[in-house]
Amino acid sequence: MEKIHIKKNKLKALENRHPWVYSGAVAKMPEGLNDGDIVEIVHSNDKRLGYGFYAPGNQIVCRVFEYTRKELDPNTQEYWSDKIAKAYALRKAHVISDETNCYRLIHGEGDFFPGLIADVYNDLISLQILIKGVDRIAPMIVKAFQALGFERIYNKSKEISKRLENVETPKGWLTEQQGSPKVEVLENGVKFWVNVETGQKTGFFLDQRDARALVGKYSKGAKVLNTFSYSGGFSMYALKAGATLVHSVDASQSAIDLCDENALLNGFDKGEHKGYCADVFEHLTKMERDDYDVVILDPPAFAKSAKAVTAAARGYKQLNLKALRKIKPGGIIFTFSCSQKIDKELFRKIVFQAAAEAHRNVRILHQTTQPNCHPINIFYPENEYLKGLVLYVE
Ligand code: SAH
């Protein structure tokens, strides 16, 4: 196996198990490597650090999937089956239950598997393959999932990311067994329709399971506004917990249609739920004051790059300010950011500024993050992308 030698004075990050090797850390690079080749990463004196996927780039040249001193052969089915089985064991022990059969099975670096996202929806797996290294081992990945009993695997990759030119695994079914791309799933006992073919991302947003449960706790007897609702994740929990009325707002009509379908699926057919296809900012500007007891703000990532952080911060502030101005005294705001480039300190500062400008007393009741099927690799803090604050507004 080809070896990438690391400079002596750049070993720190790798000894600390950061999953990326930057070009500046490389002392010696073998010639003729192809995108996605599996390589060994070694000290300049040849001592082994681990294994990774080579990526030809100006910045990140290797994504490490295994830190070990031992000699391994990661070009085998056994290696990848074992890695996937370990990720599954965590979910089996702490995520899957009679109440929950949808969850993230592989969370990229969080499962020591850079470049792969695998989401389970009942009997079906929906994939995002993000790098060439993973693309090249896709057949082994499919076999590993099949060994765990998943016979239907759907690849979303191409649709999702623009930096995938090099990924060749076709979009669509990767298994002989196919059937309907639309499945019914259970999350904490709440039912949802998920369509992996037509849905956003891999079909559903699995990263808000814990926060949705928390919304349930505050929704009994409440009038709830769920903005950026997509298929109504938060809305359904609020309804199930006994909200008197839930409004879902999303710019996409198909998302609102999904909300309506999901409300029916959970037995709410008496007008307890109403969907609005509208821009959230306009909706918040137009709506009455003091109308809602609970407001949920779960926008898409406003900052997709480091450059976009300033503009994104303004967006988050405006959004929170509008909700803070309108919510009923004693009301609760659930506010989230899934922009990886905006960390929790910055997010809290933004919400603080909005609260100050709204001239209202605000107390933080909870701080939320992603659930345990999105584990955070301790050596890769960037893995923690979702943050939320639950605010009590006087
Ligand atoms: N809260 C959702 C996930 C939100 S994803 C859940 O729990 O599943 C973000 C959603 O915001 C998408 O459905 C997208 O259609 C919608 N969206 C993006 N910009 C919007 C805007 N300006 N106004 C209304 N909806 C918007």
Image (cartoon, rainbow, N blue to C red):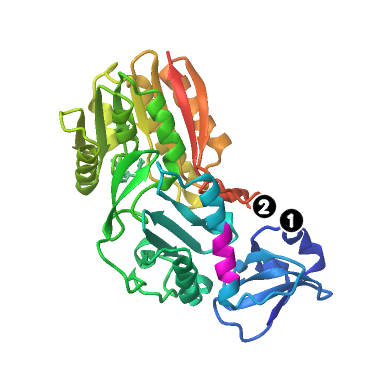
Q: Residue at x 81, y 63 (%)?
A: 9
Is 263 in front, or is 176? 176
Question: In the rendered structure, which disc, 1 or 2, sits on the residue that comes first in sequence?
Answer: 1
The relative height of residue 140 versus residue 203 in the rendered view (above or below) is below
The relative height of residue 33 versus residue 346 in the rendered view (above or below) is below
Q: Amino acid at mark 2?
A: Phe
- Decide: few, some or many residues near mark 1? Use Cα within 10 Å; few <14, some 14-19, many ≥20: few
Residue at mark 2: C-beta within 8 A of ligand 1: no
- The residue carrying mark 1 is 16
- Dividing the picture into quadrants, the one containing residue 266 is top left
Contact (Cβ within 8 Å) of mark 1 with mark 2 = yes
Quadrant in which the C terminus appears: top left
- Dividing the picture into quadrants, the one containing residue 321 is top left
Where does the magenta region start and end? 79-86
- Decide: few, some or many residues near mark 2? Use Cα within 10 Å; few <14, some 14-19, many ≥20: some
Q: Residue at x 38, y 32 (%)?
A: 318
Can residue 322 be spotted in the picture? no
- The residue carrying mark 2 is 379
Looking at the rendered structure, the secondary structure element under dot 1 is: loop
Of the four image quadrants, the one with ligand 1 is: top left
Q: Position of residue 96 (x, y in %)?
A: 46, 47
Looking at the rendered structure, the secondary structure element under dot 2 is: loop
Q: Position of residue 3 (x, y in %)?
A: 71, 78
Residue 81 part of the magenta-drawn span: yes
Q: In the picture provided, is 316 more to the left or to the right than 15? A: left
